[in-house]
Amino acid sequence: MTLGFDTRRAERFAEKMTSALNGAALGLMTSVGHRTGLFDVMRGAPPASSVQLAERAGLAERYVREWLGAMTTAGVVEHDPAAGTFSLPAEHAAVLTRAARPNNLAATFQWIPLLGSVEEEIVNCFERGGGVPYASFGRFHAVMAEESDQTVVAGLLEHIVPLVPGLAEHLARGVDVLDVGCGSGRALARLAGAFPRSRFHGVDVSACAVEHASDEARSLGLSNLRFGVCDAAALDAADGYDVITAFDAIHDQADPAAVLASIAAALRPDGVFLMQDIAGTSVLQEDVAHPLATFLYTVSCLHCMTVSLSSGGAGLGAMWGERTARRMLAEAGFSRVDVQVLPHDPINLYYVARKA
């Protein structure tokens, strides 16, 4: 036995890692439950057998039965062995179903298999450097769109727009709005529908995301909304915008400093930049206090940092934090920066930045 070895500490750590192993497995199966609609089928329904649930969801019974085994042993689903039935408690459905939006944690669990899908490429990056490009993350835009639905779209009009005094009134009168890193465009579509007198423009480096966003805008009949493929570090300052937004987008950029400078140049003198980004502190020992710190650093390592590095970028990472963000905003020309938090969104900070 090694001198000074704490057996109890070793046992407690082993228990912690065993729990983590079960948690990782639960994460994968929770994602499956969300994507297959099983949680939604079980919500508010009477206890049912695996055969009945499979029929309701239009799924293969054998897989549903094994999934129920994982959910039962994890304490997510309740099982009546005498009746051979399964049920989802209302208290669990409140955080696991689409009806629970914006509190649907099952949607967020999709990040686990998405990140796991690039493990081989990430290991190669550990050994050789470089990064993993966006193209390797097959379902990224679909998962990000659902995440945006919860953290941005669900509270956009009620919570986020009011962070900027007078913004709702300006949007109602009619202003020019740019969204940087628009992805599938759901946030901008929500604003365009609510404020028909304003003009909205979304840009993203992904042609696939822009095509999807444009199709959705057309299907909604939003004539005041357009999208385009664009490097955010090279915005056309001649266009001029009254409002620029960036929802969870800046830290992924190859050159975030250039992007912020480009935003400042494209913003009219009395305009406002509204930036949502991850609630890091820029200090590791302080980040420990964040309830989702491990998850956020993992997302950063396996996605945010590596996609930036894949294009020779800075690799800023999701946990760049408030101190770094404030410094970079100041260097970009924003002299007034107000940082706020929203009760429904423990993951992000909201920066309201002005040039004068």
Image (spheres, rainbow, N blue to C red):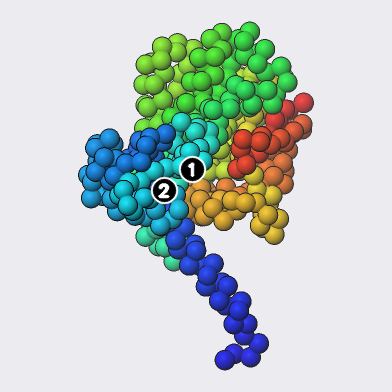
Quadrant assignment for the N terminus: bottom right
Camera-side residue of 256 and 91: 91
| Local secondary structure at mark 2 | loop
Please give the name of the residue rendered at 46% of the width and 26% of the height, measured from the top-left corner.
185
Image quarter for residue 213? Answer: top left
Please give the name of the residue rendered at 52% of the width and 73% of the height, measured from the top-left corner.
14
Categorize mark 2 by other alpha carbons within 10 Å: few (<14), some (14-19), many (20+).
some
* Image: 22 above or below 159: below
* Image: 291 above or below 213: below
Please indicate whether residue 165 sits to the left or right of residue 35 in the image.
right
| Residue 23 coordinates in the image, percent (x, y) | 47, 58
Please indicate whether residue 64 sits to the left or right of residue 284 in the image.
left
Circles 1 and 2: CB atoms closer than 8 Å: yes
| Residue 265 coordinates in the image, percent (x, y) | 64, 27
The residue singled out by tag 1 in the image is 92
| Residue 114 coordinates in the image, percent (x, y) | 40, 48
Please give the name of the residue rendered at 57% of the width and 43% of the height, measured from the top-left corner.
251
Image quarter for residue 217? Answer: top left
Camera-side residue of 90 and 322: 90
Q: Which mark is residue 77?
A: 2
What's the residue type where badge 1 is placed?
A: His
- Kindly tell me whether residue 83 is visible in this rendering: yes
Q: Residue furthest front?
A: 82
Quadrant assignment for the C terminus: top right
What's the residue type where badge 2 is placed?
A: Val
Camera-side residue of 205 and 278: 278
Q: Which mark is residue 268?
A: none
Please give the name of the residue rendered at 67% of the width and 18% of the height, measured from the top-left corner.
167
Could you give the CA–CA distance between mark 1 and mark 2, rounded to whole angstroms? Answer: 8 Å
| Residue 205 coordinates in the image, percent (x, y) | 45, 34
